[in-house]
Image (spheres, rainbow, N blue to C red):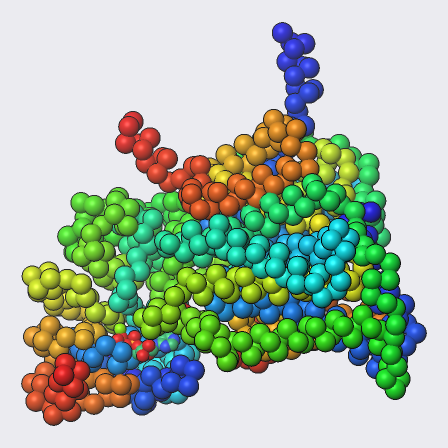
Amino acid sequence: MEPETAFSAIGEDLICIGRVTVFLQQFANALALGSVYALFAIGFTLIFGVLEIITLAHGTIFMVGAFAGLLAVTKLHLGLGPAILTAMLAAGTLGWVIDLVAVRPLRKRSFHHLAPMIATIGCATFITSIAQGLFGAEAYRFPFDFVPATSYTLGPVQLTLLQLIIIAISFAFMVIIIVLLHKTKWGKAVRAVAENRRTAALLGIPVDRVYQITSFTAGALGGAAGILTGINFNTIHAFMGGPMLHRGIAVVILGGMGDIRGALLGGLILGFSEIMSVAYISSDFRDAVSFGLLFLILLLKPAGIFGRTGERKV
Amino acid sequence: MGEFLASTWYTYNTLLYTIFVNGMLALSIYLTLACGQLSLGNAAFMGMGAYTAAILTMKAGAPFGIALIAGGALPALVALIIGIPTLRLSGVYLAMATLGFGEVVRVAFLNMSITGGSLGLNGVPAKTEFWHLLLVMGILIYFFVKLKSSRFGRALEAINEDETAASVMGIRTTLFKVWAFAAGAFIAGVAGGLNAHFTFFVSPREYGFEFAVDILTFAILGGTQTFWGPIVGSTILTLLPELLRFMGPYRLALNGLILLFVVIYLPNGIVSRDTFKKKADRG
Amino acid sequence: MLKVQNIIKDFGGLRVLDGVVFQVAEGAIFGLIGPNGAGKTTVFNIVSGLLQPTDGRVIFNGADITRLPPHAIAAQGISRTFQNIRIFGEMSLLENVLVGMHRLFSYSPAAMFFDLPKKRTEEKLLREKACDILSLVNLEDKADWAAKNLSYGGQRKLELARALATDPKLLLVDEPAAGMNPAETEELMDEIVQINRRGYTICVIEHDMKVIMGICGQIAVLNFGELIAEGSPEEVKRNPLVIEAYLGKEG
Ligand SMILES: Nc1ncnc2c1ncn2[C@@H]1O[C@H](COP(=O)(O)OP(=O)(O)O)[C@@H](O)[C@H]1O
Ligand SMILES: [Mg+2]
């Protein structure tokens, strides 16, 4: 299957649901979609907040997480929980490796502000190409009935078990990450570095370790988003990272760069906008929605919806 | 002898044409890189130019020159619209906005009827002569030579090095960045128009993110300190796949490695300012 | 000439400037002093348009320039140097100065493309002028060096030359003596006096009071974002608040 058709197939089941059910049903669908977007974007925004770089390899990490989860299920016959952990471990390790080979060497000297972004494009291109070589361009699926097609009725809304799992896991991870950042020693170190790396270094915080931990954590979150997306749409292919990266970028700009709660809200907003545009306008627009939102926010409120005006660094 | 030349030309003219078109694309992204901005939309701009020019010659019977200029003007206009809100902001926003923009354009090509949907446009008339490419490339090189020693070229360079300091020197940084981005889009559009009229078709699959990365790799490998860098880089990378056919699906992996390697170990690319300095010293 | 009126600046929740007021008279060398972190550079950033004040106004020659973008403020005739040197390292010294002259050029893109006489005469004239400016800071013999290859002191001078090249009415100089030895510092102070004699009004930041005592007619002292004294060097030196601020810092 061509990658384009593979990806547009993702929207198909949403479209059907969209046409037949009411607004509240859309609400549930949007929540499932948006919570994964938020999960993906939190990793992206975490890297920006702490390392002060834009990592354009985050989509690739997402794709690798999805494949790792898939292989864990199909080759190792693991269940959902262990598969998610495998995906997170693989993607987290990849995030750490990318930091090591592409970003860290640049940190050691003064570099042009585009350099890390270009280096991460290099990583993304390399890994995607390898994945394409290994897996071809076709889409892979999880075994039939990997997640039973049970659904629950809550008033007028039908929630599938899958949607419940996705929403629960995404929110669980988001809560965990926020708690970790605020309550643990390492979390506080990460926040201190995000605030001001020089002061943090003066306070004896091992800045380089913080960067590595952040890269791993962000990658792991991206990997979790990858496997959840893979299960949700039941298609996994080498090019699935690109469209997700566009969405992640839109979400992060929407929520304000480096703002975790903003990414959460931004993810939900994008999820809703996509579901609603598919339901009430046209499915052709789905891929354009994220760019539309991004453009609008750049036009009106470039600092993000929370509008904390970004001071330019002088 | 004459026969040999003719057959060589017959075998390699497509390659030669492609070298010129890729050189133009590399110059188109160089203009934005030269003021410290990263555009990942130049493949999309090329596509817009290709479709616009091809539709004009195929369906409206427009003269080739007019079609080419229109093929440059449309992406330039779109670049102004994207650039004005985006380039007011700091360095990284253009890359992020154009990344999403490229995706939108790709989806639009696939879904519009005037672009022939997923089939694209076939039977674009053969209009591109070799001298067209020479002429356009000649104009571009002349332009970049003049730009370099002018107030405009210096302003772009200053913005690239330190935008804040440049603004304090009275340079309207946003204005320069927007024009550089739009001019780059114009060049990419013209290159797209030229390309469509010698490959005879326009396909919606050719102008995606992967090709945007190709274009970026041309410029980064060659170096962005002078405009010769992108020309050298694109020439090498256009010839390289011919030599590296055996790499098959892993060809793109090479692009990735080049980007990574050059950014870290050869930040000025193959052709840097010093390349010329040393020559001048020796001479 | 320059009136800074009740400037307040918050970064996040932190108040960095709290109601700063002072005036710089035309033709003067005005000193802005205070311990490190007092907010001096922030004042320059606001005057030159790089930062927006939370509240307050900046008036230059009777016009409100508070929320103008940096290039517009440069066009009004305010130029500056940076505490952490910000020259264009890859460009030559001459090109650095020519960038400073950006607003003095007026030829069009068409004149550039077709190499029209207007472009050629303008480039020739201003290149000569750029060389003159470089010789003002004794760098003319290195005009085609890449700026990054200059010594630290040389880079400071180049930054001064570049700021002068914009033909400003008011020149803001941020800690020009930072990182220099006493002899170099003295030479630099001399050069600042020379520049002032050519008719440029100068506002100079320094954290070490002694360095600029000799050259300033008027001094304002900042401490923790508040203006604690203003007056002649003699008055300021005797001001108990100033003594306390400086002793407090040392002790
Ligand atoms: N862009 C900024 N963001 C946050 N805090 C800043 C910024 N610029 C300056 N500050 C803070 O403002 C205070 C004053 O800084 P500054 O004006 O550089 O002092 P000075 O030049 O007098 O040494 C310092 O505490 C500094 O940390
Ligand atoms: Mg300072």
Residue furthest right in the image: A20
Residue C237 located left or right of residue C88: left
Residue depicted at 58% across the width and 30% down the height: B240
Expressed as whole percent of the image width and height from the top left, the position of residue A309 reads 50, 78
Q: Position of residue C241 (x, y in %)?
A: 15, 91
In the picture provided, is B148 more to the left or to the right than B45? Answer: left
> Across the whole image, how many numbered discs are drawn on residues?
0
Horizontal and vertical percent position of residue A224: 67, 64
Please provide percent x and percent y for residue B37: 50, 55
Q: Nearer the viewer, residue A175 or B61?
A: A175
Q: Nearer the viewer, residue B77 or C86?
A: C86
Give the answer, above or below, for where B253 lies relative to A303. above
Location of residue A151 with respect to A120 vertically, above or below: below
Visible residue check, residue B68 = no
* Residue at the outermost bottom position: C240
Residue B121 location, quadrant: top right
